[in-house]
Image (tube, rainbow, N blue to C red):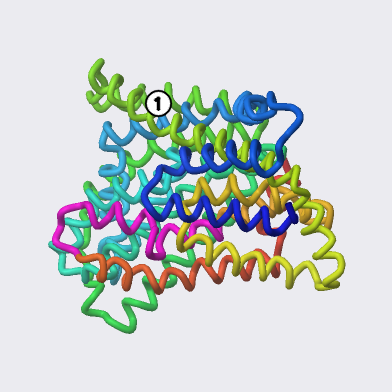
Amino acid sequence: MEVWQGFWLIVGTVALLLAVGVRVSYALLAVGLIGAVWVLDPSDPMAIGREPWRSLKSYSLTAIPLFVLMAEILLRADVTKTAYRGFATILGPLPGGAAYANIGGSTLFAAISGSSVANAAAMGTVAGPAMTEMGYSRRLTFGSIAAGGGLGILMPPSTALIIYGSLSGVSISALFIGGMLPALLLACLFSLVIMIWGFVRPDDAPRGSRATAKELLSAVVGLFPLFLLMTLVLGGIYLGIFTPTEAGGIGALGAAALAAGRRKLGLRMLWESAAAATTLSSMILLIIAGAAVIGYVIGMLGVTFELAFLVADAEISITVLLALIALGYIILGLFIESVSLIVLTVPVLYPVLSAAGVDGVWLGIYIVVLIEIGLITPPVGLNLFVLKSISAGQTMNDIIIGAIPFLGALLGLVALLLAFPQIATWLPSMA
């Protein structure tokens, strides 16, 4: 079968199955298996079983269930409530202070969770009702929560970066370190959007009451354990004291200790956290297994080599190529959720771009930022649906319109990464 005919047949079939509601992992496995038997007719049938096993036996993937477990424990310990209230107390007197608190709380929780959906759900439950009662517009309220939730897949420990590292072979520790500055910069850009919004529409972003010295001290004391856990996990990775997997285990233990200190730890809570972590981790690993089979088919078709030849023959600059790739990710992100998009595209793009001299750490951060755009754009923006499911009276229209201004911040970070790649590579080079 001609290379590109086979490739588009695979892509089209996966898209069709997803459109009719088939689960992502099942769609990938089904198309991969049929493709391996029918399209390629491989002489080595064991490859159909070998490829999923090869993709899942990576030691780096063991960090995923540990970080997910840490996030689940923290969610049940009401840590997001503490983070939001702490930042709201400190920033409340500013115009739009509660919206800034969304970004601050999301950034802090992202640094100890690694999940955008969990981030958006937790902050939406806590901040959504509080901000609407304070008189904030629903569009600013839920737009800022949706955008801030996206920090979960960029700020380490990010499950998206773990998956990218396992697929590309790039050091996950380097990816975690490289994601710190872009994530903090993105939080600043989100805050800039809120500031401009508050200036243009001041009624949407009222001031809160000024906190007393005692309330400020209580807020700082409440935030300190979270900063300590974040420093322990990320600082240990940065200093090379432990691997990302070890950091996940230490983080889960630290989360349990924090929950115990808040008198939230119990056998039932641990069981629910472990069950939720198992479910989410299994879903992610099944998607990776399905993508491995499709990756095998695409590799045997020679798509990667054909793409490399096309890039070489086109004689376009790397910057233009990366801009075109960005456009492709933005379009695909409208229809494909984040994990699936990573596992479907990285095995094809990484070898080509790596051979062209693109830094692997930078590329991972760049791709994750582009995928983050898909989290807050319809029709499959997961953060949008999570926030709609929270019963606070908001409409999907309010959430989508509220999230649109924050797309400017994400696109701004994409441009900054293209213009100044050191944003993602400087810290890893210093480690």
Residue 184 locus on image (x, y percent)? 52, 56
Image-based side of 368 in relation to 258, left or right: right
Q: In the picture, which quadrant includes the C terminus?
A: top right
> Relative to 198, does residue 352 appear above or below in the rendering?
above
Amino acid type indicated by mark 1: Thr
In the picture shown, does residue 365 fall above or below 331?
above
Res 131 visible: yes
Looking at the image, residue 41 lies above or below residue 8: above
Q: Position of residue 397 (x, y in %)?
A: 26, 70
Residue at screen point 39% across, 34% down: 71
Q: Which residues are magenta?
A: 369-394
Left or right relative to 318: residue 76: left
Can residue 392 be found in the magenta stretch? yes
Q: Which residue ends up furthest to the top in the rendered image?
A: 267
Q: Residues within 10 Å of mark 1 (few under 14, many from 20)?
A: some
Of the pair 92 and 350, the residue shown nearer to us: 350
Find the residue positioned furthest to the bottom.
200
Image location of residue 278, percent across then percent down: 40, 26
Which residue is at 46% across, 63% downward? 334
How many badges with numbers are in the image?
Answer: 1
- Quadrant of the rendered image containing residue 323: bottom right
26 or 134: nearer the viewer: 26
In terms of secondary structure, where does tag 1 sit? helix
Q: Residue 409 magenta-drawn?
A: no
Height in image: 428 above or below 189?
A: above
The residue located at (32%, 68%) in the rendering is 400
Nearer to me, 211 or 120: 120
Q: Is residue 154 visible?
A: no
Question: Picture quarter containing residue 236?
Answer: top right
Label 1 sits on residue: 278
Q: Residue 89 in the image: x percent, y percent? A: 26, 54
